[in-house]
Image (spheres, rainbow, N blue to C red):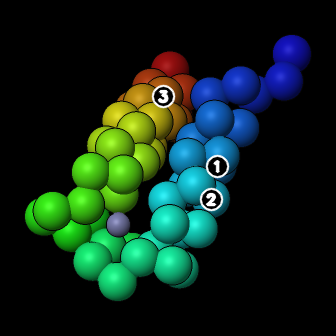
Amino acid sequence: MPDDLYARYQDARRAYQQHTDTCRACTPTGPGSDCDDGRRRFVRLARLQDLYLTRLKQRRTR
Ligand SMILES: [Zn+2]
C-alpha cells in the first residue's frame, strides 16, 4: 500500500514552496499576514505535517 499521507505531505510542501518562490509576502517559515493563497497552502501543509509527525511518533512507541 502506498504511503498516501506522506505523498500528500510532500505535495503540500511543494505547493507552499512554489508559492514562496513567487510571493514576496510569504517566507518558508510562514505566510504573509495579508496573503490568502499563502495562508491556505501553509495551513494545509501544517495540518499534514502534524498528522505525519504524529503518526511517526506512534509508530516509534508501538
Ligand atoms: Zn503569499
Of marks 1 and 3, the one in the foreground: 1
When asked about the image quadrant of residue 7, the answer is: top right
| Residue type for callout 2 | Arg
> Can you tell which of label 1 and label 2 is closer to the viewer?
2
Label 3 residue near ligand 1, CB within 8 Å: no
Q: Nearer the viewer, residue 29 or 25?
A: 25
Residue in view at x 63 percent, y 35 percent = 8
Whether residue 32 is visible, yes or no, is yes
> Residue at position x 59%, y 68% from top?
18
Q: Do the residues bearing badges 1 and 2 touch, measured as CB atoms within 8 Å?
A: yes
Q: SS for tag 2?
A: helix
Q: Local crowd at mark 1 within 10 Å, few (<14), some, or many (≥20)?
A: some
Q: Quadrant of the N terminus?
A: top right
Mark 2 = which residue?
14
Q: Measuring from the top left, give residue 35's x and y in whole percent.
A: 25, 60
Q: Secondary structure at mark 1?
A: helix
For residue 45, above or below residue 3: below
Q: CA distance from mark 1 to mark 2?
A: 6 Å
Q: Which residue is mark 3?
A: 55
Circle 1 sits on which residue? 10
Q: Which amino acid does the dot numbered 3 rest on? A: Arg
Please give the name of the residue rendered at 41% of the width and 48% of the height, measured from the top-left corner.
41
- Does label 1 or label 3 sit earlier along the sequence? 1
**Circle nearer the N terminus (3, 2):** 2
| Residue 39 appears anywhere in the view | no
Residue 21 on image: x %, y %? 53, 80
Identified by mark 1, the residue type is Gln
Q: Is residue 61 above or below residue 11?
A: above
Disc 3 secondary structure class: helix
